[in-house]
Amino acid sequence: MKNLHAAIIGLGFVGRAHLEALRRRGIQVAGLLGSSPERTKEACSSLGLDRAYSSLEELARDANVDVVHICTPNHLHFDQASALLKGGKHVMCEKPLAMDTRQSDNLISLAREQQRVGAVAYNLRYYPLCQEARSILERGLIGVPRLVHGSFLQDWLLYPTDWNWRLEPQLGGELRAISDIGTHWLDLMTWITGRKVTEVCADLATVVPERRRPRGRMETFQKSTTAEFDQIKIATDDYGSVLLHFEESLRGVMTVSQVSAGRKARLWFEVDGSEGSMAWNSESPNTLWIGHRSKPNQELPKDPALMSPAARGYAAYPGGHPEGYPDTFAQLFKDFYAYVAAGDLEAPRSFPTFETGHREMVLCDAIAASNRERRWVAIA
């Protein structure tokens, strides 16, 4: 893997998370491409990188780069991924993979035609105890899963003065809370349970109907410091609850919100099986709760010595040493780069792929249709 070279497009919060994780994995990062030559050069200087690409075309032509990480606003993903695949690059793309299912389907076909590997950064699978939760279900330790429920709650868009490019449909898409954080929850639960969603019934709401858009640049999760703003009407979802039918009679419900005060990024799930239950939340990621009826409940700490063989390889540190959000990227990239280095594109893929990203977009379409038409919608 040390012979593979990467580059990153996008210099915001998540682009820097990718860079840190790549360095931890020993992957050499050749350079960066930002929104302007000036910002790219400044970032390369501050981050200790040599090459500041001036354009997407320049990056796509760089024969020294094997993999490109796309960490840009949603509306740019399709064009950037297409150009990079045609340039012979493997692609790790932040979600959503594209703006619609036509684009995401085209990217799947293009990756196959170019014989390149495409992945989507659903990194939350890679918390060690989420890996353990999947193993617990696979081993039947809580019986047959019957119910799945949970939420993903944030508060960073609570006030009308909060702003981000994701609020603009032409940049982020027609769905927001569902697409931005709901797809993380849906990906995690379909992956842990091994069951696909077959039908949805959704209720979405725009809780803050008007917002102040600052005049000037603002990074994600940062507050505006400018006194100049425009009053903008908002149509995308601040909140959503979705009833879910999965394969094999599994039932579920998910709630997402970006307007829940005090919740910075709390993903919580519970799986209730025929013999027991288990629950986990990202605010306490190093503990997995396991529920019983006929004996005391348990709390499993993140400790590779106590975890199953299938999951312990995703815990980088021994028991008593917490792991969190940055570690999930490092574990995702471990799987992805090992696959790319092996060179067998017919081998099974353990990481979230372009096909994963496409399925999440199909789910989003069904959720939007269900909310619009006020009915259950089957997944195509």
Image (cartoon, helix red, strand yellow):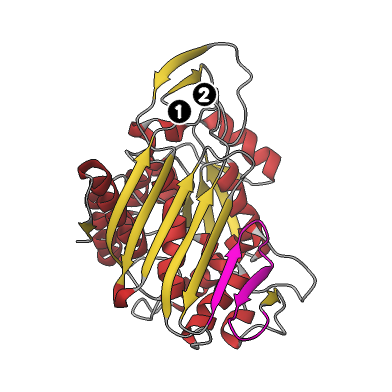
Residue receiving disc 1: 208
Q: Which residues are magenta?
A: 276-296
Identify which residue, 280 or 194, lies in the foreground.
280
- Residue 377: in magenta span: no
x and y percentages locating residue 145 in the rendered image: 43, 78
x and y percentages locating residue 371 in the rendered image: 27, 44
What residue is at 65 percent from the left and 83 percent from the top?
307
**Is any atom of residue 1 visible in this view?**
no
Q: Quadrant of the C terminus?
A: bottom left
What residue is at 32 percent from the left and 44 percent from the top?
79
What residue is at 53 percent from the left and 81 percent from the top?
276
- Residue 284: in magenta span: yes
**Residues at circles 1 and 2 in contact by the CB criterion of under 8 Å:** yes
Please name the amino acid that badge 1 sits on: Val
x and y percentages locating residue 312 in the rendered image: 64, 81
Q: Quadrant of residue 58?
A: top left
Q: Which mark is residue 341?
A: none
Residue at the front extreme of this rendering = 294
Identify which residue, 376 or 22, lies in the foreground.
376
Identify which residue, 197 or 108, lies in the foreground.
197
Specify whether 367 is left or right of 217: left
Please name the amino acid that badge 2 sits on: Pro
Residue receiving disc 2: 160
**Is any atom of residue 129 visible in this view?**
yes
- Secondary structure under the numbered disc 2 in the rendered image: loop
Instruction: Judge the density around disc 2: few (<14), some (14-19), many (≥20) Cα neighbours within 10 Å.
Output: some
Mark positioned earlier in the residue sequence (1 or 2) = 2
- Secondary structure under the numbered disc 1 in the rendered image: loop
